[in-house]
Amino acid sequence: MELKDKIDKENLPKHIAVIMDGNGRWAQKKGNQRIFGHKNGVKAVRDTVEGAAELGIQFLTLYAFSTENWGRPKKEIDALMSLLISTINSETDTLIKNNVRLLTIGDIDGLPVTVKKNLKELIEKTSQNTGLTLILALNYSARWEIVNAVKQIVADNKNEPIDVDEINNEFFEKYLNTADIPDPDLLIRTSGEYRISNFLIWQIAYSELYFTEVLWPDFRRSDLHEAIVDFQRRERRFGKISEQVKKN
Ligand code: FPP
């Protein structure tokens, strides 16, 4: 029996988020430059997106470039931006063919003009697609997102004081980049690192966390299947006790 056949289609995670890690180490292990790892990381992105779409996953968020990644050597940043542009262009037809809708989260205004332009075009071209929603986190960090939300709340309520009782989770979530996107059910991190790295801190409050030693360029849909099978073995209690959850 293949791993994929072990997946219960009735209990799929609606939203999977992925911290794609280990590109640099993968390349260095092979005696290559770090960017070779990023290039091969695109193959993993392609297979994971296809694998998620094929299963009927509704949302897939990939952490592609963090706010902190600007601190990397300029050569690597430039290569990552070029890779992003070439991937957007080479994958356009496949995304459309597979009914994938593209969205982004993060401070998109802070990205190079060409990246912004290409992203905007692809988002428009795929906006009517009804299958998987692929969300690229670009120039993203959770603390930036939360601070940005607070700034917007203050700006929106400049003229009259906000009613404190109006502020609750639902109110706040509307100001996050992920407004209208369900919280991730499953968060995957590759490369054997056990960290969240400023990713979706608010949204993963009740996500199941899955860590694998696999380096991102080696990650394939079979690894995604393994993570989902593991997820389906878990009991999600959301703060309640086991007996209460089993009743529902
Ligand atoms: C982490 O590995 C990976 C990144 C910071 C970039 C991810 C980018 C891609 C997979 C390619 C482009 C993406 C898309 C969506 C087209 P690392 O460099 O931190 O690896 P290390 O921890 O081994 O150094």
Image: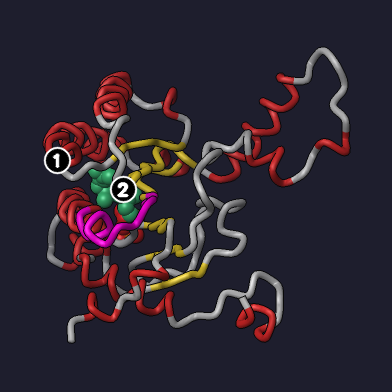
Q: What amino acid type is highlighted by mark number 2?
A: Leu
Q: CA distance from mark 1 to mark 2?
A: 12 Å
Question: Along the line of sight, which residue is nearer the eye, 16 or 20?
Answer: 16
Q: Crowding at label 1, few (<14), some or many (≥20) Cα neighbours within 10 Å?
A: few
Residue 32 can be seen, yes or no: yes
Asked whether 11 falls inside the magenta stretch, the response is no
User: Alpha-carbon neighbours of circle 2 within 10 Å: few (<14), some, or many (≥20)?
Assistant: many
Magenta residues, as a range?
50-61
Seen at 77% across and 20% down, the residue is 157
Q: Is mark 2 within 8 Å of ligand 1?
A: no
Q: Which residue is mark 1?
A: 97
The residue indicated by pointer 2 is 132
Among numbered discs 1 and 2, the one appearing first in the sequence = 1
Residue 52 in magenta? yes
Question: What amino acid does circle 1 point to?
Answer: Lys
Give the percent coordinates (x, y) of residue 243: 67, 86
Q: What colour scheme was applied to this rendering of the protein?
A: secondary structure
Label 1 residue SS: helix
Residue 215: percent from the left, percent from the top?
27, 67
Quadrant (top left, top right, bottom left, bottom right) of the C terminus: bottom right
Circle 1/circle 2 CB separation < 8 Å: no
What residue lies at 13% left-to-right and 66% top-to-bottom?
30
